[in-house]
Image (spheres, coloured by chain):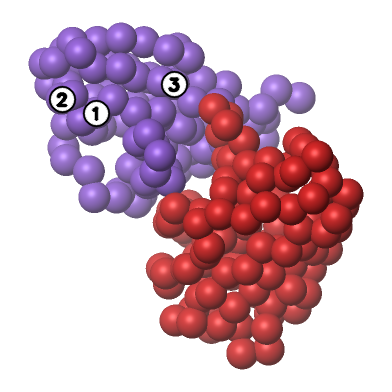
Amino acid sequence: DAGVTQSPTHLIKTRGQQVTLRCSPKSGHDTVSWYQQALGQGPQFIFQYYEEEERQRGNFPDRFSGHQFPNYSSELNVNALLLGDSALYLCASSFRQGARTGELFFGEGSRLTVL
Amino acid sequence: DAKTTQPPSMDCAEGRAANLPCNHSTISGNEYVYWYRQIHSQGPQYIIHGLKNNETNEMASLIITEDRKSSTLILPHATLRDTAVYYCIVRVNFGNEKLTFGTGTRLTIIP
């Protein structure tokens, strides 16, 4: 059983560019969340998708957007990249039973470097 | 979500029990205590969670005080592979996938 898979694992962009990161949730999971982890810090919640809609959002600007597809996979898009966007981007998946949230399983992350 | 307070770092001898404390004095009645760990350059890994009763699984035990204002994660026989940053998180687990990570405790297992 594959866990949460993310791609690409590493990428380098320059300021002002746009980036798309991808996530496939663990089999049987229907909810995807995205987190940003700067060096030496704990992960910070960006947003969460359930039933193809953004349900929760953290304190991130509109440059950060996402999408969830019918197969539950998800994309994170960041526009107009800044140097401060350099971080490890983590995807987490979970399964909802009714409103109850299950444990979150994290992928290994996509490390973005902005030059 | 309630805030948590953890010591920044701890050492533990290999084979001994590692006891990691966490204070969450403002926890609400419907908030659970979760523990995750992050081994260097990997994604966080779920360890255990509980509401008010003590919990045990194959990885660890979780002891929650009666007033629920603090908890302790116990790794019964620490190995070198347990070296990681451990995060204590409190959250409501209904319709809520947001985990508020603090800076965690960096646990180093000493051979």
Bin the neighbour count of mark 3 within 10 Å (Cα to Cα): few under 14, some 14-19, many 20 and up: many
Residue at which label 3 appears: A110
Residue B59 appears in the figure: no
Residue A16 appears in the figure: yes
Q: Is residue B91 left or right of residue A17?
A: right
Q: How far, Cα to Cα, is label 2 from label 3?
A: 16 Å
Q: What is the letter of the purple chain?
A: A
* Mark earlier in primary sequence (2, 3): 2
Residue at which label 1 appears: A85
Q: Position of residue B87 (x, y in %)?
A: 55, 54
Q: How far, Cα to Cα, is label 2 from label 1?
A: 5 Å
Quadrant of the image occupied by residue A101:
bottom right
Residue type, mark 3 in image = Ser
Residue type, mark 1 in image = Asp
Q: Chain of mark 2?
A: A
Residue at which label 2 appears: A82
Q: Position of residue A81 (x, y in %)?
A: 17, 21
Marker count (numbered)? 3
Looking at the image, which is closer to me, B106 or B1? B106
Q: What is the letter of the red chain?
A: B
Q: Position of residue A84 (x, y in %)?
A: 20, 30
Looking at the image, which is closer to me, B83 or A63? B83
User: As displayed, is residue B43 above or below residue B82?
Assistant: above
